[in-house]
Image: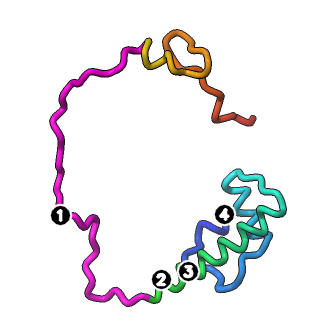
Amino acid sequence: MCRCAKMTLETMPKKNISTTELKHLSDLAHLSLAAPHLVKLKTSLTALIGYIGEVKKIKLEGIQPVAQVTGKVNEYRPDVITPSLTQTQALSGSPKPTHQGFFVVERVLHHEA
């Protein structure tokens, strides 16, 4: 089990995040970060955790939690069919070739064995 799984805001260290901890987090997120990015991220993440600590100090007793503030409830629009592009028209603006009526895009997810 990862040692981060038991960490909460209450148990987080009140100090700067170490480079070792940051490398561990980046490994968990499958991020490979160069040294300059680690320094910048370390500074930003330490500041963020400090800010979260400040927000936690706000007294919220007697304040009702809200999910939204507009008062609107389940507003739906009518489902009306309107004129739109044909498949050929939509594909005609593609900067890359199409294949069997679909856009061709670069692979985004790569599976590493």
Query: Spatial distance from mark 1 to mark 2, Cα to Cα?
Result: 26 Å
Question: Which comes sooner in the sequence, label 1 or label 2?
Answer: 2
Q: Is residue 61 magenta?
A: yes
Residue hosting label 2: 55
| Contact flag, marks 3 and 4 (Cβ < 8 Å) | no
Residue hosting label 3: 51
Residue hosting label 1: 71
Circle nearer the viewer, 4 or 1: 1
Q: In this view, does 27 lie above or below 3?
A: above
Q: Residues within 10 Å of mark 2 (few under 14, many from 20)?
A: few
Disc 3 secondary structure class: helix
Q: Which amino acid does label 3 sit on?
A: Tyr
Q: In this view, does 102 lie above or below 110?
A: above
| Contact flag, marks 4 and 2 (Cβ < 8 Å) | no
Q: Is residue 53 left or right of residue 110?
A: left
Residue 14's spot in the image, x, y percent? 64, 86
Residue hosting label 4: 2
In the image, the segment drawn in magenta is 58-87
Query: Spatial distance from mark 3 to mark 4, Cα to Cα?
Result: 25 Å
Question: Which comes sooner in the sequence, label 3 or label 1?
Answer: 3
Relative depth, front residue between 103 and 96: 96
